[in-house]
């Protein structure tokens, strides 16, 4: 067991961080930016300061790995590229805005018999 552990299988592959930033940030620059930001935001109410970010939702992607027995045949498939883009936003007080969903079709089939101008979204 120790030989297998020392070969790098556990520490190299299973315990690697899969997300994060590639380069580090200078802590002095961060401190300076925080100080400048505090002075810029002094005259604003917390409910008027927002942060927004977009993310992709791949809603029909299957896992790219599976467990199988040695010698067992398996077949993969094409990776689905169907996705929605979500814009998430909240203010400094933690009040969330309704997420904005962006698809790729200008006129999706799901709205074929619906007058989208009458919906409560813009």
Image: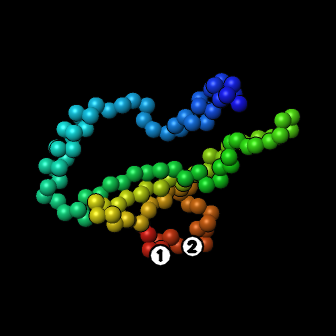
Marks 1 and 2, how far apart in space? 8 Å
Left or right: where does residue 26 sit relative to residue 38? right
Q: Is residue 51 above or below residue 115?
A: above
Image check: 117 left or right of 28?
A: right
Q: Secondary structure at mark 2?
A: loop
In the image, residue 113 sits, relative to residue 19, either above or below, namely: below
Quarter of the image where the N terminus is located? top right
The quarter of the picture where residue 14 lies is top right
Q: Is residue 120 at least partly visible in the picture?
A: yes
Residue nearest the observer in this picture, 8 or 54: 8
At horizontal 48% and vertical 74% (from top left) the residue drawn is 119
Q: Residue at 65%, 49% (x, y): give it.
A: 61
Provide the secondary structure element on which disc 1 rests.
Answer: helix
Residue at (62%, 46%) from the top-left corner?
Answer: 81
Outermost front residue: 2
Residue for point 21% across, 44% down: 34
Q: Is residue 80 above or below residue 97?
A: above
Query: What residue does disc 1 label?
Result: 118
Image coordinates of residue 105 in percent, x first then y, are 56, 55
- Number of numbered discs on residues: 2
The answer to which of 104 and 63 lies nearer the viewer is 63
Picture coordinates of residue 114, whole percent (x, y): 57, 73
Q: Residues within 10 Å of mark 1 (few under 14, many from 20)?
A: few
Question: In the image, is 12 to the left or to the right of 118?
Answer: right
In depth, the one of 89 and 29 nearer the eye is 29
Q: Position of residue 103 (x, y in %)?
A: 53, 55
Quarter the C terminus occupies: bottom left
Circle 2 is placed at which residue position?
Answer: 114
- Label 2 neighbourhood size at 10 Å, few (<14), some (14-19), many (20+)? few
């Amino acid at each position: 067991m120790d030989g297998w552990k020392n070969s790098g299988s556990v520490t190299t592959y299973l315990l690697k961080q899969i997300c994060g930033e590639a380069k580090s940030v200078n802590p002095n620059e961060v401190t300076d930016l925080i100080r400048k930001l505090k002075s810029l935001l002094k005259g604003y109410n917390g409910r008027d300061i927002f942060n927004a970010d977009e993310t992709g939702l791949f809603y029909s992607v299957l896992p790219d790995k599976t467990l199988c027995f040695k010698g067992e045949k398996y077949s993969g498939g094409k990776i689905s590229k169907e996705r929605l883009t979500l814009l998430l936003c909240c203010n400094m007080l933690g009040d969330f805005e309704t997420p904005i969903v962006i698809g790729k079709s200008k006129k999706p089939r799901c709205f074929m018999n619906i007058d989208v101008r009458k919906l409560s979204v813009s």
